[in-house]
Image (tube, rainbow, N blue to C red):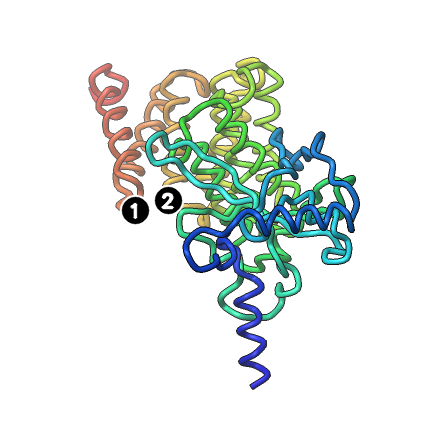
Amino acid sequence: MKKIIFYMGFIAICGLQGMKRTPPQGGEPSSQPIEQERSRRRTEGGDVQEQDNKKIIPGTQRYLDLNEIDSIEQESLAEMLANTEEFPQGIDIVETMTIDNATNTPYHHYLYAPGLRRYMYTGRDTHPVNRLPLNRQFMRPFHIQSVDSELTPISLDLVIPAGGNNALYEIALGLQRGDIGNRSRQDYQRAADYYQELIKNQQAPQDTRAAAQFDLATMYVNGQIGSNRPEDYQKAATLYGEVIANQQASQDARAKARVNLASMYVDGLIGSKRPEDYQQAATLYGEVIANQQASQDARAKARVNLANMYVNGLIGSKRPEDYQQAATLYGEVIANQQASQDARAKARISLAIMYVNGLIGS
């Protein structure tokens, strides 16, 4: 019987649906009792400041207005914090996001999360943050002690032991790819902010952190953030290098970082297109090709790119043996049934061009 009572209390207290309290008979809840309650709390708990109650969301340039009315408690967050008798430890808040279907624009919402951390370790499958309305994506949780204090993040791993960081990564990736938002600079900056948050979170899975580093680096290379300046490319190279050096990241993640870093050397985004820069790129490609644990796609891309270097004379001396080395690499990609169709198609085209230009054959 105690278990049933506890479970019902868990459902009642932890709901984050943002639903209003049960309205009186006859329709929507009356605003008069709410205003009376606010007046009482201003008298008993002290005056609630109506100005300058905006708190910056850590790690972003967005603000939470404590004067906004919370849809669960039917009063402002500032009024809740002023009532130290009912909320002596402050309050927990979750950031959620909805997508405007007409414009594909993301909007952020903030909900009071009663009992969020009290039930973190109940071991139940239905965690309160998983019971949001279907159109709301959980972003991250915060705690605020008083109106005068700042918002402090609550570790995602504490609130959602399984999947919290992965959910944040998927949202960042969606913003980067344009699946969420409008491919605006603001959307790309949001993605970068989320990637940075994951990178700094030492408790996040290593593969998730490595993926965030890889994707953030790619955003710098593609000019989605930064301004295609040398320092932006250096940031990208540093991020790729951190993935490569991370022994706890997957072999495939490290292989893909090697491929992209090598391509930066080839394209002159780092280095000065000197022979030693091209040799560094060739070494990175060679390490991926030799890595049996890397994905077939990563290894195929490394082979095609290394072959291109031989053809273009970036390594070797455009001797027959250099062209033959390139042809061999293209042939290996073409013969690899596990490589992507795109990689095999590129290898076929490049090999055909070699025949047309008389670089191989008679």
Residue tagged by mark 2?
Answer: 296
Residue drawn at (72%, 58%) of the image: 86
CA neighbours of label 1 inside 10 A, class few (<14), some (14 to 19), many (20+): few
Distance in Å between CA atoms under marks 1 and 2: 6 Å
Q: In which image quadrant can residue 355 be found?
A: top left
User: Any mark on residue 160, and which?
Assistant: none
Residue 191 place in picture, x, y as percent: 52, 33
Q: Is residue 263 above or below residue 168?
A: above
Question: Is residue 250 visible from the viewing direction of this image?
Answer: no
Residue 186 place in picture, x, y as percent: 51, 25
Type of residue at label 2? Gln
Foreground of the two, 281 or 157: 157
Type of residue at label 1? Gln
**What secondary structure is marked by label 1?**
loop
Compared across the picture, whether 33 is left or right of 130 comes to right
Residue drawn at (28%, 30%) of the image: 347
Foreground of the two, 316 or 283: 283
**What secondary structure is marked by label 2?**
helix
Question: Is residue 75 visible from the viewing direction of this image?
Answer: yes
Quadrant of the frame with the N terminus: bottom right
User: Any mark on residue 338, and which?
Assistant: 1
Q: In which image quadrant can residue 274 be found?
A: top right
Residue 298 place in picture, x, y as percent: 41, 39
Disc 1 + disc 2, Cβ < 8 Å: yes
